[in-house]
Image (cartoon, rainbow, N blue to C red):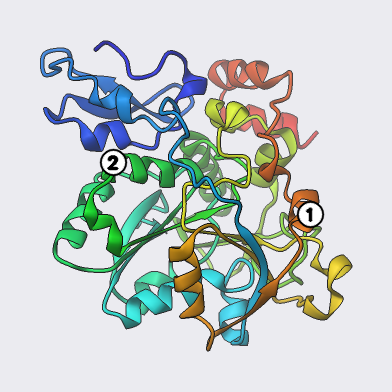
Amino acid sequence: MEKVYLKKEYCSGCSACYNSCPTKAIHMKPDEEGFLYPVIDQSLCVDCNKCVNICPLICEGNYKQKAEPAFLVAKHKSEEVLMNSTSGGAFTALSDVILREGGVIYGVDYDDDFRVLHRRTETIEGRNRMRVSKYVQSNIGNIFEQIKKDLMDKRTVLFTGTPCQDAGLRAYMGDSPLTENLYVCDLICHSIPSPLIWEDYKKLLEKEHGGKLTDIQFRSKIIDWSRENSNKTFLFKTSSSEDIHNDERFYKLFFGAKTITRPSCSECQFTDIHRASDITIADYWGIEKYAPEWMDTKGVSVILVNNEKGAELLQKCSKELKYEKRPKEESFTEQQRLSEPVQFPEDRDKFWNDYREHGFEYIIEQLTK
């Protein structure tokens, strides 16, 4: 086998092939845009085709649920949880159920250098680091193998990731009976930005403000939760002072210019209501129009319950989470990624050509002119 994918639009970097290769012939290598892709060591490959056969972008059905989900509005009953969550605290409620039962949580965290990666935790403190947005594609690493080990040890597991990462985990686990104790949660994903641009952005902030980054927060709720405000706060601190800074340039590249998103996001096969997860969470945009009594400037969540396991998990959250069913049309209207993938701008290639020729600071200067 020479390659798992035919072109970059057909690889989401979910790492299912890497984690599943029986001879460890595959490793994940960043390309010139910083996105990880599987590379095959021909000296180790035995042409078993497992990598191709399980790929969630190739597999018929993409490991998605066939039934239509139930749509709900939800909000955590704790104001402290709301203020420290990206949306309405749904992830905290769901993960608290697993932790109470002695289970394990897998979600997205930062390392000491604010690189974005998936991690394992059994503690509330570790979980709390996972409950805020991180607008960078996370590195899965060997997390799928760790999940399988936990399941073999009869631990209950909650994994939260992007839809393609969830499908990658489904592919890796296959029809194993171990999945009885596995709960899979996904996000309604806009798209996934480049880890390379994120690294350059961090270096620029340190250069401009001095010292090393000591704290980062996307989508702070120092201003009211709303769609309009969702891309107005990126707060950070450096070791040079105790001042808190706000900068919107990364948002402008990601949400505005749309030039730093992974190629596969333009052909995403998970932008519909049939999910690869048991339960889906996101912001309930537009709730102030459809049910103003639910509106809360500290955050509101939409939840898609995709199967019986998702319903069972949600039911266990009843003491912490207030929720009720809503018409699916509301989410169809407000959540574009439930119907179509992100559309790349015509100048995406020019952006990357300029980046390679002139560097990141030139790109930022052009953005702010």
Residue found farthest to the right? 289
Residue 104 in view of the camera: yes
Q: Is residue 101 left or right of residue 82?
A: left
Q: Is residue 366 left or right of residue 66?
A: right
* Foreground residue among 244 and 294: 294
The residue drawn where x is 63% and y is 86% is: 79
Packing grade of label 1 (10 A; few <14, some 14-19, many >=20) is few
Q: Which quadrant of the view contains residue 151?
A: bottom left
Where is residue 362? Give x, y as percent.
Answer: 64, 27
Q: What residue sits right under mark 1 in the picture?
A: 329
Residue 130 in view of the camera: no
- Image mark count: 2
Q: Earlier in the sequence, mark 2 or mark 1?
A: 2
The residue drawn where x is 81% and y is 62% is: 286
267 relative to 95, above or below: above
* Foreground residue among 92 and 304: 304
Q: Is residue 316 left or right of residue 340?
A: left
Q: What residue sits right under mark 2 in the picture?
A: 172
Q: From mark 2 to mark 1, how far is it between C-alphas?
A: 33 Å
* Foreground residue among 170 and 360: 170
What SS does tag 1 mark? helix
Packing grade of label 2 (10 A; few <14, some 14-19, many >=20) is many
Where is residue 99? Give x, y as percent.
Answer: 33, 77
304 relative to 98, above or below: above
